[in-house]
């Protein structure tokens, strides 16, 4: 989703790629990038943001789509790929195949790891549901789900508290509003290809600046998983946010300012 005429003439372009089961609305706080001279574009997934559920998300095909998009840019235009969760892997796979004249950078927010985290992520997710049940002393969805959501927002520590604080309850209530209502067809379209997906063995990110922006209490992909993944692809620098979970775009919207600093080649700011 983008203005083709504006993209064709832009000096700086930012392409935002959401995660599985996520709308492009997660990138709402990136509006400030326009004031810094960036023309924004957004990759959409089946069944969301006006697209029909008539195809399946295939990450490698999505990466090829990103490369095709980059071919439409002005020859000297700079390109920043901003990927959230699954979108980060798509950006990483696409980046080496884009003309280096575009000075591509990849900002990865709460990046997924290969195979969608595999068995470790499945087991930890199931464990979080059990923790939410134990903490709420209930199996009722209307009680368990808000506590599970609290873990996504601020980390596993919030799952164990006997009583959620008023501040946490407010954050969960506000956070629930950003959920995209999904049906089974959309879930299958987004998720079926992920468990078997890994980056190409010959992936070469030489000369492409990459940075990870993660919540240090992310219950979906642990800091250890992310650190191991960083090492695998060449030692990507990681900017971590204490006390934060997987949904940085909501709990720490200033992550977009930090990613803009990275896009502009500025060092991370201290807070």
Image: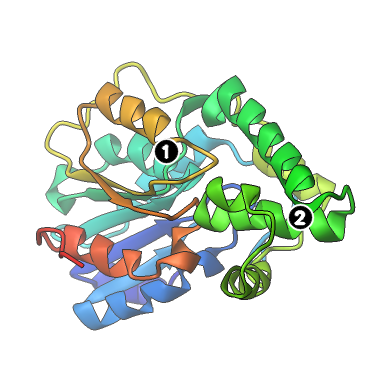
Residue at the (42%, 38%) spot, across then down: 89
Q: Nearer the viewer, mark 1 or mark 2?
A: 2
Q: Residue furthest front?
A: 162
Residue at the (63%, 53%) spot, across then down: 161
Residue closest to the eye, 146 or 136: 136
Residue at the (77%, 43%) spot, across then down: 134
In three-dimensional space, the C-alpha distance between marks 1 and 2, rounded to whole angstroms, equals 28 Å
Q: Residue furthest bottom?
A: 35
Disc 2 crowd, CA 10 A, few/some/many (<14, 14-19, 20+)? some
Q: Is residue 227 left or right of residue 48?
A: left
- Disc 1: which residue: 89
Q: Is residue 27 left or right of residue 142?
A: left
Q: Is residue 259 left or right of residue 68?
A: left
The quarter of the rendered structure image containing the C terminus is bottom left
- Disc 2: which residue: 145
Question: From this viewpoint, is residue 220 visible?
Answer: yes
Q: Give the colour scheme shown.
A: rainbow
* Residue 87 image point, x, y percent: 46, 47
* Residue 169 image point, x, y percent: 65, 71
Nearer the N terminus, badge 1 or badge 2?
Answer: 1
């Amino acid at each position: 989703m983008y203005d083709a005429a504006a993209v064709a003439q832009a000096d700086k372009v930012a392409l935002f790629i959401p995660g599985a089961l996520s709308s492009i609305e997660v990138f709402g706080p990136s509006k400030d990038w326009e004031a810094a001279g960036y023309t924004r574009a957004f990759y959409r997934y089946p069944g969301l943001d006006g697209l029909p559920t008539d195809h399946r998300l295939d990450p490698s095909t999505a990466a090829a789509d990103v490369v095709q998009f980059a071919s439409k840019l002005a020859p000297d235009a700079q390109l920043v790929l901003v990927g959230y969760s699954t979108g980060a892997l798509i950006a990483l796979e696409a980046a080496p195949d884009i003309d280096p004249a575009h000075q591509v950078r990849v900002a990865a927010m709460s990046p997924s790891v290969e195979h969608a985290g595999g068995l470790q992520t499945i087991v930890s997710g199931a464990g979080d549901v059990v923790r939410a049940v134990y903490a709420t002393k209930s199996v009722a969805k209307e009680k368990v789900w808000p506590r599970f959501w609290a873990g996504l927002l601020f980390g596993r520590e919030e799952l164990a508290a006997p009583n959620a604080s008023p501040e946490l309850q407010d954050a969960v209530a506000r956070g629930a509003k950003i959920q995209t209502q999904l049906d089974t067809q959309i879930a299958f379209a987004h998720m079926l290809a992920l468990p078997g997906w890994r980056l190409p063995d010959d992936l070469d990110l030489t000369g492409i600046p990459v940075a990870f922006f993660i919540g240090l209490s992310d219950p979906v992909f642990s800091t250890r998983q992310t650190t191991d993944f960083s090492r695998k692809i060449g030692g990507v620098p990681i900017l971590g946010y204490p006390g934060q979970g997987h949904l940085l775009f909501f709990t720490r919207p200033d992550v977009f300012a930090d990613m803009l600093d990275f896009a502009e080649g500025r060092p991370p700011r201290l807070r």
